[in-house]
Image: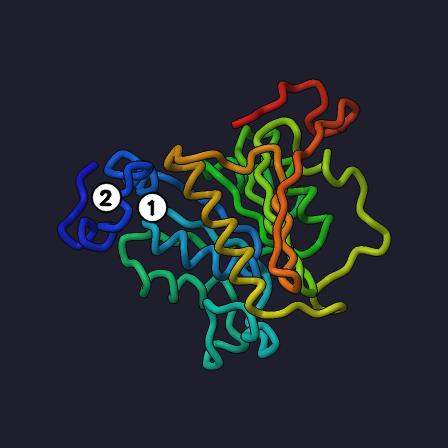
Amino acid sequence: MIFSEDEVERYARHLVLSEVGGPGQQALKRARVLIVGVGGVGSPAALYLAAAGVGTLGLIDDDAVGLSNLQRQIAFSTAEVGQAKVAAAADRLTRLNPHVAVETHAERLTPANAAERIAAYDLVLDGTDDFQTRLCVNAACVAAGRPLVSGALGRWSGQVGVFAGRPCYQCLVPDIPPDAETCARVGVVGALAGVIGSMAALEAIKLIAGAGQTLTGRLMLYDGLAGAGRTVRVAADPTCSVCGGGPVRRR
């Protein structure tokens, strides 16, 4: 895979990194990444993955840009309020990096379309804010053998984890919490979305380029108010209905 002169200059800071270099950048260019939910997590993650040179980005979201989104969803502008998020984001990403192909799916990811959508990509980044969709994404990723980068946030705290086979996200969340919070209900500080979205993008880049130690089987918890973070290991649930019985993955 040959880079143009524009790409060599564009990715110069990656190409001189020993952990990325030419092979890692080529892997990024070959990669197909699906971003589920172009919101607080997905919006900054998409920008950084496009800037990093991921060859194909898929965006799936059935929502339109709202004025309240602009406090944290930095892929959008005031002029785009009312537009479909996937269309507005695709335009922004293409202007950021014309070498990236953007595929849009103006729909909600559901059990009916999850298998088809996820099988078409190498890696999935989930930034949705409801547990039903997260569990659906996880089940489809396990079935298709696709690694999942999961990011979530609310109020002043957030988390990022990577799941590849076993343990899976459902081992972490076996049932939908009855008192699950959403950003719309409890609020969220805007800059936190940038922190968690960037962390999720970083994990995706590491997975694709084969760099460093990923968060596979682990969860990074970040407390924005305290300015502190910690990482915990996710235990595989032997009775998990999604991944139970499969091998535990570590990296």
Give the left or right position of residue 237, taking residue 158 as reference: right
**Which colour scheme appears in the figure?**
rainbow
Query: Given the image, on which type of amino acid does mark 2 rest?
Result: Val
Above-or-below relation of 168 to 101: above
User: Which element type, helix, strand or loop, lies under badge 1?
Assistant: loop
**CB of mark 1 within 8 Å of CB of mark 2?**
no
Quadrant housing residue 181? bottom right
State the residue in front, 205 or 97.
205
Quadrant of the snapshot with the N terminus: top left
Q: Earlier in the sequence, mark 1 or mark 2?
A: 2
Query: Given the image, on which type of amino acid does mark 1 rest?
Result: Gly
Label 1: how many Cα within 10 Å (few below 14, some 14–19, many 20+): many
The residue where tag 2 is placed is: 16
Give the left or right position of residue 176, taking residue 247 as reference: right
Residue 163 location (% of width, % of height): 59, 35
The residue where tag 1 is placed is: 55
Identify the residue at image location x=61%, y=51%.
Answer: 229
> How far separated are the C-alphas under marks 1 and 2?
19 Å
Q: How many marks?
A: 2
Label 2: how many Cα within 10 Å (few below 14, some 14–19, many 20+): few
Identify the residue at image location x=34%, y=41%.
Answer: 28
State the residue in front, 87 or 129.
129
User: Which element type, helix, strand or loop, lies under badge 2?
Assistant: loop
Most extreme residue toward the left, as rendered? 5
State the residue in front, 17 or 177.
17
Identify the residue at image location x=41%, y=56%.
Answer: 48
Residue 50 location (% of width, % of height): 37, 54
